[in-house]
Image (spheres, grey):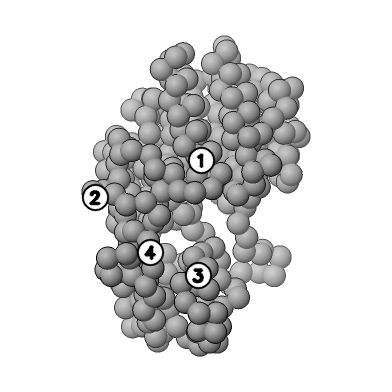
Amino acid sequence: MKILVTGATGKVGKAFLATFLDEELYSSAKVVALCHNRKIDAGERVEIVAGSLADPEAVAQAMDGVTHVLHMAAVKESPDLAIDVAIKGMFLLLEAARQSPTLKQFILISGDCAVGHIFKEYPEPITEVSPRKAYSGCYALTKVLEEVMIEQYQIQYGLNGTVLRAPWIMEKDDFKYVLSFGADQFGGPVWGDLMSFDKAMRLGQGDFVPLMRDKTGAPLKRNFVHVDDLVAALMAALDHPDAMGELFNIAMDEPVDYAQVAAYLTRTRGLEAVEVPTPFHSNWLDNTKARHLLGWRPQVDFEGLIERAWSYVRSPNDPRKIWYPG
């Protein structure tokens, strides 16, 4: 096995490589990492190809002799990079894959932005056959386009493609700071968009936890997955016969309920819940298909997400960051 990994320097990429290289089943496998802005260390089993996904020569070099592709490289809200990475880069990878005499499987990591996560309403759980409803912005659009492109290569050329669609991926103490009202908040939503600036600043000085409510007034339910569970799904999908040509939702068994989170943190950490009305929709990313066909089970529920985040001690040289552009 020789696996090409794009996005190897990111959150999922680093976690996957650590697991993959330590797995006895793949002890003789080689890794090629196509790196652009950031680099990882080469090794006896890890080869680095420096270059852009939009560079045909770099892609051709990286794809030489590859049996598996794990495509994770992405850009966030970067319109100047979106076409090069998500469209041209994806096209070059797929073209090389369909013409490769060695390629066995192409795995794409997609995101629930393709189905709009909390910005679009669904009357039932979101399955792999639910309509795509990207929210505004180029990042969500690129995920829809990537999913469609790999589907078409499966239809047109019989490519063995697998798509793992993940919601917001948590690691280390991320979830603790997702819930912060302070300047150290990780990700969103921006509290100043949901309340006055003064109120957000005041809450940031105390021990509070947001109890967000959706558009109907019910506690907001939002989908997450821990990076360890996503990596486990990746490992399960590798060469799995039931993964061929399939799309899988990879998420926790149930979406995170902000009322349950607030109650748990009030009970265990003494935080005070603060009601936050929002225009968002509660959605459920249904992982039944992955559990049934891949035999995969997420191990981290919302309590595990909280306990891991609150017990993690982050070193000064390990900053919390969003890993884009990749």
Please name which of the two marks, 1 or 4, marks the residue nearer to the observer: 4
Helix, strand or loop at label 4? It is loop
Q: Name the residue that disc number 3 marks.
A: 193
Q: Name the residue that disc number 4 marks.
A: 279
Q: Is residue 137 left or right of residue 261?
A: right
Question: Residue 123 got which mark?
Answer: 2
How far apart are labels 4 and 3 at the CA level?
A: 11 Å
CB contact under 8 Å: marks 3 and 1: no
Q: Give x and y (percent) for residue 323.
A: 62, 52
Label 2 or label 4, whichever comes before in sequence order: 2
Up the image or down, 112 lies above or below 2; here it is below
Q: Name the residue that disc number 1 marks.
A: 141
Q: Give x and y (percent) for residue 257.
A: 32, 66
Q: Amino acid under label 3?
A: Asp
Q: Is residue 276 visible?
A: yes
Up the image or down, 316 lies above or below 3; here it is below
Q: Nearer the viewer, residue 132 or 231?
A: 132
Quadrant of the drawing holding the C terminus: top right
Q: Amino acid under label 4?
A: Pro
Label 4 or label 3, whichever comes before in sequence order: 3
Label 3 or label 1, whichever comes before in sequence order: 1
